[in-house]
Image (spheres, grey):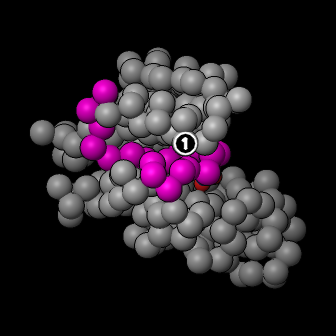
Amino acid sequence: MKAPLGILISGRGSNMAALIEASRAEDCPYEVVLVASNDPQAGGLAIARDAGIATFAHSHKGLPRAAFDAIIDKALRDAGVRYIALAGYMRILSDAFVQGWAGHMLNIHPSLLPLYKGLDTHGRAIAAGDAEGGCSVHLVTPELDDGEVIARARVPILPGDTPDSLAARVLIEEHRLYPAALAAYIRAHG
Ligand code: GRF
């Protein structure tokens, strides 16, 4: 049986779409059972619905962090989720939520971690004069973008690159790396 996966998004959901697409393969070890968002307007929700995936949306606005995370946690557990993939989820998670999913929650971050945790990763890599950028899939721990890195993909930073041009080059790699790294992790951990 495939492991039930929940995906958390806040935006356009291109990594989510890549995970859903990959999950269709017979030998993929996960199936996407829920896409949840803190933003009812997130573009990825419509993509998920069109792909026949159940969705859950609840705005975080006006709610204490722990209370909001409890709502998301219930939606995930009601759906039978065993693993969570964060895919452009723009909320800091409460410690209780992270601990409740320890070892079962992965994120993709658009830098070669441990470089450039947080936001504006591509702008900072260009400003530093780095020769390479990239993306990392890591386990989620209470400290932001700090958990064990399980896979990385690298791209060159080219003369004249802007944060947008570099982001586009990295995104292509994200869409390859995330499904592959998640599948390998689930195969190894059951
Ligand atoms: C990606 O660059 C991802 O690495 C970062 O947020 C962005 C989300 O893009 N965490 P998308 O919503 O998956 O298209």
Residue flagged by tag 1: what amino acid is it?
Ala
Q: Quadrant of the C terminus?
A: bottom left
Majority secondary structure in the magenta region: loop
- Residue bounds of the magenta highlight: 78-97
> Can you tell which quarter of the image residue 128 is in?
bottom right
- Comparing 123 with 68, the one in front is 68
- Residue 27 appears in the figure: yes
Dot 1 corresponds to which residue? 66
- Comparing 128 with 104, the one in front is 104
> Can you tell which quarter of the image residue 76 is in?
top left
- Comparing 30 with 38, the one in front is 38
Residue depicted at 67% across the width and 22% down the height: 41
Residue 154 location, x and y as percent? 57, 72
Residue 147 location, x and y as percent? 47, 69
Residue depicted at 63% across the width and 38% down the height: 64
Query: Is residue 80 part of the magenta span, yes or no?
Result: yes
**Image position of 109 (left or right of 49):** right
